[in-house]
Image: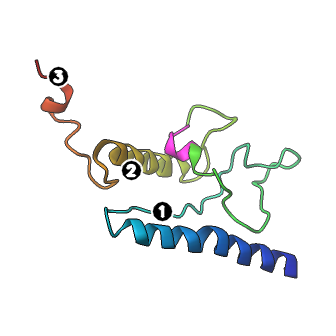
Amino acid sequence: RTNFWAAEHLVGDYVMACTQRRAAALMAEAAPVFQYEFARVPTEAPFRSPWHLAPVDDGFGACHGCEIPFVFNRNDSKEFGITGDGELQLGLFMSSYWTNFAWSGDPNDRGGRWTAEARTPSR
């Protein structure tokens, strides 16, 4: 690698990771905070080079937004879908965690949304 890549990593860590961790620590003083780091490089477009069949490998790993097809469990599209080894299972996990968080405020808590009371509106 070159000095350019070293500088890119340094700036990326300083601008994104360090500030994000500090912001999360401050928010955690008032409420629960949940974080994740997405490191999977999807095998389908748009994360695949249009000139090659292999996934884009620029040395950085997963790019900003790489998790979106997994969050929405996009197993229905060759253009923006998830089809590689383990990607369907990861998509199920990711979409479940995000749905849990939207429902209950905790990615690990299903929040009783599948109970009869949750399905039946009160009158």
Q: Is residue 77 above or below residue 2?
A: above
> In the rendering, at what x and y percent does residue 85 appear?
58, 53
Residue located 31% across and 54% down the image: 106
Pick the residue in front: 104 or 47.
104
Residue located 42% across and 72% down the image: 25
Q: Earlier in the sequence, mark 3 or mark 1?
A: 1
Using residue 12 as the reference point, say whether residue 74 is left or right of it.
Answer: left
Magenta-colored stretch includes residue 70: yes
Three-letter amino acid code at the position of disc 1: Tyr
**Callout 1: SS:** loop
Cα separation between marks 3 and 1:
34 Å
Q: Is residue 35 above or below residue 42?
A: below
Label 2 sits on residue: 97
> In the rendering, at what x and y percent does residue 96 appear?
38, 46
> In the rendering, at what x and y percent does residue 3 appear?
86, 82
> In the rendering, at what x and y percent does residue 45 appear?
73, 43
Q: Is residue 37 above or below residue 106?
A: below
Cα separation between marks 3 and 2:
24 Å
Image quarter of the C terminus: top left
Instruction: Find out whether the residues at labels 3 and 2 contact each other: C-beta distance under 8 Å.
Output: no
Q: For the residue carrying disc 1, how many other residues have a C-alpha within 10 Å: few (<14), some (14-19), or many (20+)? A: few
In which image quadrant can residue 83 be found? top right
Image quarter of the N terminus: bottom right
Task: Point out the stretch of residues depicted in magenta.
Answer: 69-74
**How many numbered badges does the structure rendering display?**
3
Instruction: Find out whether the residues at labels 3 and 1 contact each other: C-beta distance under 8 Å.
Output: no
Label 3 sits on residue: 121
Cα separation between marks 2 and 1:
11 Å
Q: Earlier in the sequence, mark 2 or mark 1?
A: 1
Label 1 sits on residue: 36
Residue 2, visible in the rendered structure: no
